[in-house]
């Protein structure tokens, strides 16, 4: 058996306790063999975790990874104007090679900040899947569909592409890639298509990932035109099941929260994007209190502007308290759970907890930094003080993706250079 030992650190357990322990990994199976004191000194490879906290790899449950290319491309606008005036025109000019370049840059950024799995909605998915395969992360990928402004043939072709991609790439990269059908939102895909799209996906066991209840500009027309709330409409369309998950869920009322809890549909909270686009404050504590599965996501780098899940945890805690008008709301253990087990459950990917027999997906956080001293409470530090740049090693599926801050699976400098070239050429075309 080929083994990896993460030695001499403190390990964050699923119950949010921390213990001095080594982690022993079966690299062939990609699973954790043991967690405890002084494990197999003869392991094939050892990662030094002295002075470090070993945490589950972070799970970014809603992202558009290739949007790193559009980081800083358009800022300081609300969602609708931002998409229509800037982002969608730029995206219309993106080539498959551009998307690959953006994805590789995003994957480097994720590995360097301890993220080992993510859910993504974009286009040119074969290029994103190839980049994920090379990078070594896990992902739930899908082709996002917008039917707005399309004729019937184009709308149907887009939906067919989403279903085809979901079929073709499920299980790719040695099983690390899973897929979903991805209608962009309840307002950008017309009802005449949504119902059939969702039914076709579910008939084949394909889950559905979409944006919902993000802004009042999106919610109000649904309420005005249909006389019902968006998630009542989503339930009627069949896209509120335990397999499905939605991003944002900012403007949800109590009845919609009950629908989410009853259905078991995951909600991915994206606090930085919600603040930047001034979309609103999600009622995260209410969602948690109601038993809704809540994960955490960065959304794309154009509305964030990074893919650092440590930033996201801090933002979630701060914004959650403000939204609830209660400093005890969305506490440190809650946000750490959201970024790990909550996200993994919402998007149904392995990982999110360090336990024997579970996936060997982990991040080793170096505690030897002024902003992490003294070590009063390591869960508090993870939620409020640590940064992505504190991650020393990243491991996914038993494979070391970053060792001592050197990314091993992708060429960091080349990824940055390709992204710079791609955006320079895009700017000439748009
Ligand atoms: C059709 S692929 C996905 C699509 O979503 C766009 N997008 C990025 N961020 C958001 C957001 O916060 N809400 C809605 N849509 C968003 C992205 O630019 C792609 O066009
Ligand atoms: Zn999004």
Image: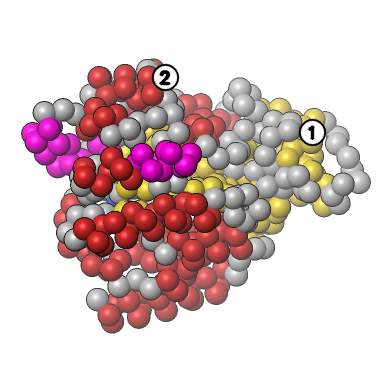
Q: Nearer the viewer, residue 138 or 74?
A: 138
Which image quadrant is residue 404 in?
bottom right
Q: Nearer the viewer, mark 2 or mark 1?
A: 2
Q: Is residue 188 magenta?
A: no
The residue positioned 26% from the left and 29% from the top of the image is 236
In the shown orientation, is residue 43 left or right of residue 274?
Answer: right
**In the image, which residues are magenta?**
198-226
Residue 292, position as x, y percentages in the image: 40, 24
Some atom of ligand 2 lies within 8 Å of the CB belonging to the residue at label 2: no
Give neighbour class at mark 2: few <14, some 14-19, many 20+ (Cα, 10 Å).
Answer: some
The residue positioned 71% from the left and 27% from the top of the image is 19
Query: The residue tagged with tag 1: helix, strand or loop?
Result: strand
Query: The residue tagged with tag 2: helix, strand or loop?
Result: loop
Residue 268 against residue 171 in the figure, above or below: above
In the shown orientation, is residue 211 left or right of residue 399?
Answer: left
Residue holding disc 1? 34
Residue holding disc 2? 291
């Amino acid at each position: 058996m080929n083994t990896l030992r993460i030695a001499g650190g403190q390990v964050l357990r699923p119950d949010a306790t921390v213990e001095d322990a080594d982690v022993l990994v079966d690299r062939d199976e990609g699973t954790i063999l043991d967690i405890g004191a002084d494990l197999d000194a003869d392991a094939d490879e050892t990662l030094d975790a002295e002075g470090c906290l070993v945490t589950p790899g972070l799970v970014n449950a809603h992202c558009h990874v290739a949007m790193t290319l559009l980081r800083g491309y358009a800022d300081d606008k609300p969602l609708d104007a931002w998409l229509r005036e800037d982002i969608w025109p730029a995206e219309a000019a993106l080539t498959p090679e551009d998307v690959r370049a953006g994805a590789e840059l995003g994957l480097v950024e994720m590995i360097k900040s301890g993220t080992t799995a993510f859910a993504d909605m974009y286009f040119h998915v074969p290029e994103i899947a190839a980049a994920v395969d090379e990078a070594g992360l896990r992902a739930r990928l899908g082709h996002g569909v917008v039917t707005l402004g399309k004729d019937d043939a184009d709308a149907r072709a887009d939906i067919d592409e989403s279903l085809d991609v979901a079929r073709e790439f499920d299980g790719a990269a040695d099983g690390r890639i899973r897929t979903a059908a991805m209608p962009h939102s309840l307002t950008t895909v017309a009802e005449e298509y949504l119902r059939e799209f969702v039914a076709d996906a579910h008939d084949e066991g394909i889950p559905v990932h979409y944006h919902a209840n993000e802004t009042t500009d999106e919610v109000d027309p649904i309420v005005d035109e249909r006389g019902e709330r968006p998630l009542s409409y989503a339930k009627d369309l069949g896209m509120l099941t335990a397999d499905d998950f939605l991003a944002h869920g900012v403007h949800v009322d109590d009845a919609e929260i009950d629908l989410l809890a009853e259905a078991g549909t995951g909600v991915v909270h994206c606090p930085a994007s919600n603040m930047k686009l001034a979309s609103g404050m999600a009622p995260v504590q209410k969602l948690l209190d109601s038993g809704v599965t809540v994960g955490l996501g960065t959304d794309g780098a154009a509305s964030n502007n990074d893919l650092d899940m440590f930033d996201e945890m801090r933002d979630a805690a701060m914004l959650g308290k403000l939204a609830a008008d209660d400093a005890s709301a969305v506490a440190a253990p809650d946000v750490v759970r959201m970024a790990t087990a909550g996200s993994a459950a919402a998007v149904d990917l392995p990982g999110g907890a360090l336990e024997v027999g579970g996936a060997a997906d982990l991040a080793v956080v170096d505690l030897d930094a002024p902003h992490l001293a003294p070590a009063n409470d390591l869960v508090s530090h993870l939620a409020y003080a640590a940064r992505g740049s504190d991650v020393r090693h990243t491991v996914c599926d038993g494979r070391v993706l970053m060792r001592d801050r050197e990314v091993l699976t992708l060429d960091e400098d080349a990824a940055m250079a390709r992204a710079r070239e791609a955006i320079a050429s895009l700017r000439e075309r748009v």
